[in-house]
Image (tube, helix red, strand yellow):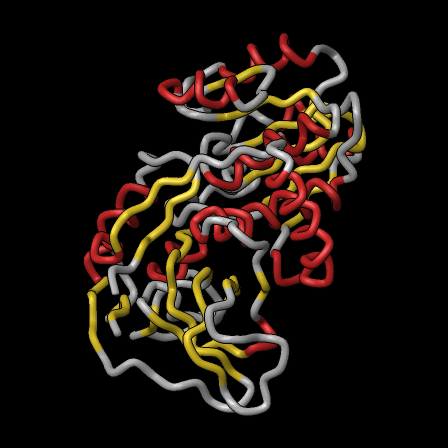
Amino acid sequence: MKFIEASKFGGPEVLTVMEAPTPTPTEGALLVEIKAAGVNYADIMARAGFYPQVPRAPFLVGFEIAGVVKSIGKGVEGFKEGDSVAAIIQGGGCATHAVIPAATAIPLPAGLDHALAVAVLVQGVTAYILLEEAKIKEGDSVLVSAAGGGLGNIAVQLAKARGAKVVGLISKSKFEVVRSIGADHVADPDHAGWARSVKEAVGEKGIQVYLDSIGDFRTEAFPLLSQCSQWIIFGIRSNMRNALPFEAIPVMIEKNITLRGFNLEGSLHHVPQALSALFKLVGEGKLKFEVTKYPLCEAAKIHQLFEARKTSGKLVLVPSN
C-alpha cells in the first residue's frame, strides 16, 4: 500500500509518499480500499503542528475517507466485502488502504460517488451542524467566510435553503461562483472598506450569524453584527496572530454579541441526523458540490494550493492502487 506521511511539522514539503505491506484487519475492524480521501483545514493545521489531536511527528496524514470494504476482521457484523463505506479516522486516510474500526464505518447509499461522500462527510456535516446550533432561520442575515471553499460553499447553500440572506466573503475572482450557489451578496475581505457594501446589502438589521473559518479579530465584521448576534469560529489560519481589538469589546457588550468556538468533535451526537439530511438533499439534487480530484502523489501540491486559498470547493485525493 501507499500512504502519505508528514516526516515532521512544517510546510507542504514535509509530506512524502511512502510504501508498506497492505495490512490485514484486526478484530472488530475493516480493511478499506480507499477510493477518495478528503482534504480539510484540519490536515493543514496538523501538518503545521497546530492540531491538538496530533501532538507529535512523524504521523500519517488524512482524517476522512470513502472506499470499499476489502476484508473483515473477526467479530464484525453488518458489513460484507464490496460494501461502500465512509469514515472519519484518526490519521492515515491519505493512502490506498486503511484499517478502521467497524464501529466508525458509515454505510453509503447505493451508487453515491466516493468523492462526493467525503465532501458530505466532514465539511457537509460541519456546515449542517453549525447552522443547526446557530438556529439560523428565515429572514436572518448570515455572513460566511471563505464562501468558495468546500465548507463555505455548502454553508451558503444550506443557509439559503433556510430562507436566510447570505453574504459570502471571498476573493473577487470567485464572486460569480459564490453568487451561482445562492449568495445574495459577495465581498472581498482583503479589500479595505468591504464592510460598507455588506452594510448596504443587509440594511440596519445587520448580521445575525457570522460563520468564521479564519479567526481574524482585526476584521471589519464587528460593526456589522446585530443585537444578540453570534460570531462562531470553526477554523483558524496559522498566520493569524491578531488579538481582539479593544474597541471591539464595548461593541460586544453593548450588543450582547456571542463569540464562540466550534469543533465537530464536540457535536458528534448530531452527526447521524446531519448525514441523513445531507444524503437526502444530495439524492434530491437540492445540494450541489464542487469536487476536484487529484492523485494521491500530489498531496504536497494540494496542501500548498489550499493554504494559499487558490482552490475552491472540495479537494479530494484519489489513490491509484
Q: Is residue 3 left or right of residue 56?
A: left
Residue 318 versus residue 45: which sits nearer the camera?
A: 318
Height in image: 20 above or below 105?
Answer: below
Quarter of the figure with the C terminus: bottom left
Whole-percent x, y for residue 76 in the image: 58, 84
Q: Position of residue 304 (x, y in %)?
A: 26, 46
The residue at 29%/80% (across/down) is: 22
Q: Quadrant of residue 45?
A: bottom left
Q: Is residue 16 above or below residue 56?
A: above
> Can residue 49 be seen?
no
State the residue at coordinates (61%, 41%): 283
Where is residue 42 drawn, in percent x and y? 45, 56
- Look at the image and tell me whether residue 71 can be seen: yes
Give the residue displayed 53% in from the left and 36% down from the top: 152
In the picture provided, is 243 more to the left or to the right than 301? right
- The residue nearer to you, when weighing 209 against 78, is 78
Q: How many numbered badges does the structure rendering display? A: 0
Give whichever of 305, 86 is nearer the camera.
86
Where, quadrant-wise, is the N terminus in this rendering?
bottom left
Residue at x 39%, y 66% (from the top left corner): 93
User: Does 198 sit left or right of 55 as displayed?
Assistant: right
Residue 278 on image: x %, y % = 64, 45
Left or right: residue 230 compared with residue 101? right
